[in-house]
Image (cartoon, grey):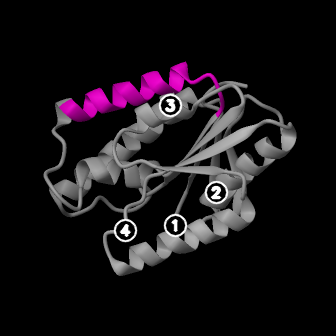
Amino acid sequence: MHPCSEFILGGQRSGKSRCGEQRAADWLAAQPGHRAVLLATAIGGDDEMRARIRRHQADRAERVPAMALDEVRHDLAGAIRRHSALDCLVLVDCLTLWLTQWLMPLEGEPVEDTRWLAVLADLDAALLAAPGPVVLVSNEIGLGLAPMSREARRYVDALGRLHQRVAARCPQVTLMVAGLEMTVKSAVKR
């Protein structure tokens, strides 16, 4: 299995997180001794978001109780390096919120372009070097109109470039629509 095994995209409430969790559950069931870890990138900046995170945690604990959790704000590449192993599936949920920490943080200034390019290169290197499977989840938000603000346009453009980069690394790319899986790219027969 290729280290960066699948990239799962979809809109809000499309079923993309559940699809990623199912990949982890299937991995855990496939062989005794398999492990899985979720690299969660959400930050509870307000009451509604904190409640949403608690709901996700409860649902996930019910669906995939054996999956470990590591909350990652910035160093996604480092977390992939720490957890990736031949017997461990790493589930990243999600790239969209991870990018938000860099380009539109709740506190502090957005990262400069030069630093962001270095972060992307580090992620790319971590994905290429990962000895075990990595499943990445992200929101597809680039299907609508161009945003009005410069900051929002920068974010949408950066997310589109990030998606292209990750999709190029993964042999399997899945688009979730209304809870249904649509294969965008496949090097593996299901």
Q: Give whichever of discs 3 and 2 has the lower sequence position.
A: 3
Q: Which residue is mark 3?
A: 82
Mark 2 belongs to which amino acid?
Met
Q: Give whichever of discs 1 and 2 has the lower sequence position.
A: 1
Q: How far apart are the two marked residues, 3 and 1, measured between alpha carbons?
A: 29 Å
What segment carries the magenta color?
A: 115-133
Image position of 172 with respect to 156: above or below: above
Query: Residue 171 at x, y = what percent?
Result: 65, 29
State left or right for residue 46 relative to residue 148: right
Q: Which mark is residue 48?
A: none
Image position of 145 with respect to 80: above or below: below
Q: Which residue is mark 2?
A: 176
Q: Which residue is mark 4?
A: 44
Task: Check whether the beta carbons of the residues at disc 4 and disc 3 lie within 8 A of each other.
Answer: no
Q: Nearer the viewer, residue 91 or 156?
A: 91
Q: In front: mark 4 or mark 1?
A: 4
Image position of 147 with respect to 85: above or below: below
Q: Which residue is mark 1?
A: 12
CA neighbours of label 1 inside 10 A, class few (<14), some (14 to 19), many (20+): some
Location of residue 118 (image quadrant): top left
Q: How far apart are the two marked residues, 4 and 3, measured between alpha carbons?
A: 24 Å
Q: Nearer the viewer, residue 188 or 97?
A: 97
Location of residue 158 (image quadrant): top left
Image point 78% across, 44% down: which residue? 28
Mark 1 belongs to which amino acid?
Gln
Q: In front: mark 4 or mark 3?
A: 3
Image point 77% across, 31% down: which residue? 188
- Which quadrant would the N terminus be assigned to in this image? top right
Q: Give whichever of discs 4 and 3 has the lower sequence position.
A: 4
